């Protein structure tokens, strides 16, 4: 027992000196410093950083539906314009037909340079007065002219003739007889009507005495050229 006590005193003294620190140098501290872990970016932050947005873009959870477009209708084809007939074309036209006869002839008579001569001695000649315009409402300009028939003697029979515009060519349509020695002075076409100015005579006058200037308005009625009305004025040769 006597040998053991000094050893215990020695150990106690050493422990006291160690606790006080003394001048022998720093002693490692028993306190442990815990450093907090760095912030871990959340999934939302990661997504935001990975997909930058521009100031004009607004995140949205829905996708805009495509805008329906309407295709403009194709333009309608413009109908071809039919050229108007000319008075010059009538010089080679036909006069009369099997349906609407001219002076009793069973078929048409063909004009050549405005003239036709028959085997019976009769002759037909296209005269100068002529009018161009739409008579049947198809917006194509038709033609109205005059022919005279001589069958021997002094007679000269005047006839107003209508030619339909068939794709720019004259096609005989109808006619109206004015009688013997009743010359036409002018023809005009307007508003689907033909105005014919011609000379005739009062009752009791001889065939050579022309004293009336008659203005007659005609219009088509099927295959007939019918008179709408007329006015008379005194005429002095």
Image (spheres, grey):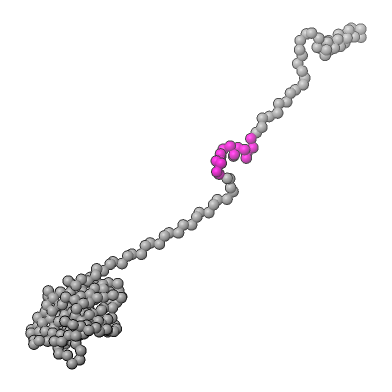
Residue 51 drawn in magenta: yes
> Compared to 223, does 9 lie above or below?
above
Q: Residue 234 at x, y = what percent?
A: 22, 84
Q: Residue 230 at x, y = what percent?
A: 27, 84
- Looking at the image, the residue that sits furthest to the bottom is 204
Residue 154 visible, this angle: yes
- For the point 90% across and 9% down, which residue is it? 5
Q: Nearer the viewer, residue 119 or 155?
A: 155
- Looking at the image, the residue that sits furthest to the right is 1
Quarter of the rendering containing residue 194 = bottom left
> Compared to 210, does 36 lie above or below?
above
Q: Quadrant of the C terminus?
A: bottom left
Q: Nearer the viewer, residue 201 or 51?
A: 201
- For the point 30% across and 75% down, which residue is it? 191
Q: Nearer the viewer, residue 101 or 181?
A: 181
Q: Residue 26 at x, y = what percent?
A: 76, 12
Query: Does residue 203 appear to the left or right of 26 in the view shown?
Result: left
Query: Does residue 234 appear to the left or right of 6 in the view shown?
Result: left
Residue 106 visible, this angle: no
Query: Does residue 22 appear to the left or right of 87 in the view shown?
Result: right
Q: Quadrant of the N terminus?
A: top right
Q: Residue 110 at x, y = what percent?
A: 14, 78
- For the point 21% across and 85% down, which residue is it? 212
- For the point 31% across and 67% down, which residue is it? 79
> Compared to 54, does 89 lie above or below?
below
> Compared to 56, does 199 lie above or below?
below
Q: Nearer the viewer, residue 55 or 197?
A: 197
Quarter of the rendering containing residue 27 = top right
Residues shaded magenta? 41-57
Residue 178 drawn in magenta: no
């Amino acid at each position: 027992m006597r040998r053991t006590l000094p050893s215990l005193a020695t150990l106690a003294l050493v422990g006291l000196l160690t606790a006080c620190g003394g001048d022998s140098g720093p002693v490692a501290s028993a306190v442990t410093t815990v450093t907090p872990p760095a912030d871990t970016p959340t999934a939302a932050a990661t997504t935001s950083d990975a997909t930058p947005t521009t100031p004009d873009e607004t995140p949205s959870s829905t996708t805009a539906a495509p805008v329906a477009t309407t295709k403009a209708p194709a333009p309608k084809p413009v109908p071809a314009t039919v050229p108007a007939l000319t008075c010059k074309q009538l010089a080679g036209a036909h006069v009369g037909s099997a349906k609407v006869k001219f002076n009793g002839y069973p078929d048409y008579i063909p004009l050549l340079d405005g003239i036709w001569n028959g085997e019976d001695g009769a002759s037909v000649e296209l005269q100068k007065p002529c009018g161009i315009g739409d008579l049947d409402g198809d917006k194509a300009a038709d033609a109205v002219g005059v022919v005279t028939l001589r069958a021997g003697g002094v007679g000269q029979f005047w006839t107003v003739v209508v030619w339909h515009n068939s794709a720019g060519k004259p096609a005989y349509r109808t006619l109206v007889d004015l009688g013997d020695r009743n010359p036409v002075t002018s023809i005009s076409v307007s508003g689907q009507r033909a105005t014919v100015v011609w000379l005739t005579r009062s009752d009791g006058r001889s065939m050579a005495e022309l004293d009336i200037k008659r203005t007659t308005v005609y219009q088509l009625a099927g295959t007939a050229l019918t008179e709408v009305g007329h006015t008379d004025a005194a005429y002095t040769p």
